[in-house]
Amino acid sequence: MFKTIEWQNNNVIMIDQRLLPNEEVYRTYKDFLDVAEAIREMVVRGAPAIGVAAAMGVALGALKINAKDRKGFVKEFEKICKIMAGTRPTAVNLFWAIERMKRVVKKNHKLSVDELKQTLIQEAQNIHEQDIEINKEMGRHGSKLIKNKATILTHCNAGALATAGYGTALGVIRAAVEQGKKIKVFADETRPFLQGSRLTAWELMKNGIDTTLITDNMAGYMMKKGLIDVVIVGADRIAANGDTANKIGTYSVAVLAKEHKIPFYVAAPISTIDLNIKHGDKIPIEERNIREVTHIKDIPIAPKNIKVKNPAFDVTPNRLITAIITERGIARKSFEKSLKRMVKADKIF
Amino acid sequence: MFKTIEWQNNNVIMIDQRLLPNEEVYRTYKDFLDVAEAIREMVVRGAPAIGVAAAMGVALGALKINAKDRKGFVKEFEKICKIMAGTRPTAVNLFWAIERMKRVVKKNHKLSVDELKQTLIQEAQNIHEQDIEINKEMGRHGSKLIKNKATILTHCNAGALATAGYGTALGVIRAAVEQGKKIKVFADETRPFLQGSRLTAWELMKNGIDTTLITDNMAGYMMKKGLIDVVIVGADRIAANGDTANKIGTYSVAVLAKEHKIPFYVAAPISTIDLNIKHGDKIPIEERNIREVTHIKDIPIAPKNIKVKNPAFDVTPNRLITAIITERGIARKSFEKSLKRMVKADKIF
């Protein structure tokens, strides 16, 4: 298969997701600033994978800090965390992972600078390994919702490429397939960045999972024809009330699912739930470069100087979500209660 | 400005819509088979424009028939009509225009072959000229539905490029703008063929109309933000009950409009109404080459050998349509009655 992200010999290795599916290129990062840039430029994307990359980036930065005492180290370390936190605004896993790295420093007063560096590297690797385990747990829970012979629509890429491996929404699909269920997947291509056609189609094909690619605007047609039994998507941030920020277009899919009485599931780790945000309308929505809309590679597909909007995410209100699948089980309405219970069940910190 | 299609010196001239907005290339057609291929390959597209192109193609074919008597001429003429009718299945204007051409031959028993040829050329030019007039009438009626400072979402291209000029949905917008109303337009890019980004954005910019390009999956987000007051789209075929086939994705936009209580208007000439088809589910839906989805120009954007669906149209059920704007006024529910009355009001044949 492939590795989305790895810590190797004190470097961070990532598959360059911008080049998939045409080229499978692994890049080696030695400087945390380059990791920050890779997150910003979407070499790596997907909320859980962004979290892992941020943690590894922070570890990489920490490793190169030239300070002999704790005070000097902490000062530099905080700068690194700040830069890393400034890369992308919506996926809360980014801030969650940086927070975990910060806690390592806060908690370990007695370690030397060298020991702190090693502990930070270890923590980044823990986040990586735990993410795979978390995905598999999510798959175990979520696959119960998937019947044999189900046809599943997914939007964007919430797969192995969006995580440390296995995937959230696609992890649920993988688990169902591993249980011997016959599953068909429809993948929205997911404009403008084409995570569906470039990434989801690619990784599901590698697994031999029956996948059909459609453009985003075909989802309603497929539902109306009775071809979709279930929708499963990932999430970039889930508010305390269950409102879910995910890739632009998710909200439209959720409205269509409601119109056709199709269950709409969100699969995301606990680290994606942000209890500090009550409602979805408080989730910051990133606006990205309009060139993502006006060009494919270097080919212009729109007139010069046309006005363009490029919000990278939208918010699906809780009323349109049937259930939220996490590694701790399946949260149902009211989400205020079920999500709070799940998050508080076992403090990760 | 530009001309979508013209009859000039016994040739058909068309702007090659596949190359817009990057290149403005006019092609000259001397052979009806090349016009048929141009319709198939979407050099020209949009239901009314396809009708005009088919009529001109038939005229071009008729002109070159090498028969001295009526019988020989009619035999060849029917072959030409059959080939032209086989180009695309969904837009009924194609069949309507060919039928008009056939009626010229049927009605004029006494004309010589040469006179028939001239009458057919005249009929094709009439269809062309009438289409522009029809669009302007549609604009006059439809613009009454558009308030000053309205923001209008449109899907695909139902503009000057989709007709002999002026446009159906965009004709309504043009008329509102000509009346001095301040209008803002959001244009869905309309995957896979990108008629929105390549054509609608291009022609509205040429008119100085305030236009913002979005990807198809952003429409729901814009509606939820309260940025869309009205949706107007064109149509490829309208069944007797008002069910409307239009570019893939129209149905999703209609469901979203209903969810947000936004009026959803269809603008189309009477020639798009097919009283022979009772319900939308009887309208044939063209499936096009999957390369439209997997490639942009020659760049692959999906893995090799991925399964793909590429329905070019979908059907919006009448319940989601607020009103249908034609050159004879605004049809409201029940559409069975209002459309029938409009179609029968004045036989075109």
Image (cartoon, coloured by chain):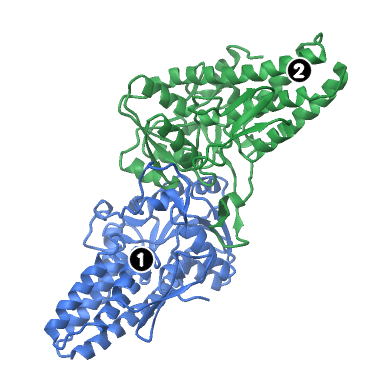
Chain colours: A green, B blue
In the rendered image, which quarter contains the C terminus of chain B?
bottom left
Q: Looking at the picture, tell me which residue is in the foreground, B347 or A217.
A: A217
Kind of residue sitting beneath label 1? Ala
A99 vs B249: above or below: above
Residue A124, percent across and down?
66, 20
Position in image of residue A18 (x %, y %): 57, 41
Q: Quadrant of residue A273?
A: top right
Same chain for mark 2 and mark 1? The answer is: no
User: Local crowd at mark 2 within 10 Å, few (<14), some, or many (≥20)?
Assistant: many
Which label belongs to residue B182? Answer: none
Q: Which mark is residue A117?
A: 2
Please give the residue where the numbered disc 1 appears in the rendered image. Answer: B47
| Image quadrant in which you'd find residue B263 | bottom left
Please give the name of the residue rendered at 48% of the width and 19% of the height, measured from the top-left corner. A136
Name the residue at the front extreme: A9
| Residue beneath the point at 66% across and 23% down | A97
Nearest to the observer: residue A305 or residue B188: A305
Amino acid type assigned to the residue bearing label 2 in the image: Lys
Q: Residues within 10 Å of mark 1 (few under 14, many from 20)?
A: many
| Disc 2: host chain | A
The answer to whether residue B325 shows anywhere in this view is yes
At numbered mark 1, what does the secondary structure look like: helix, strand or loop? helix
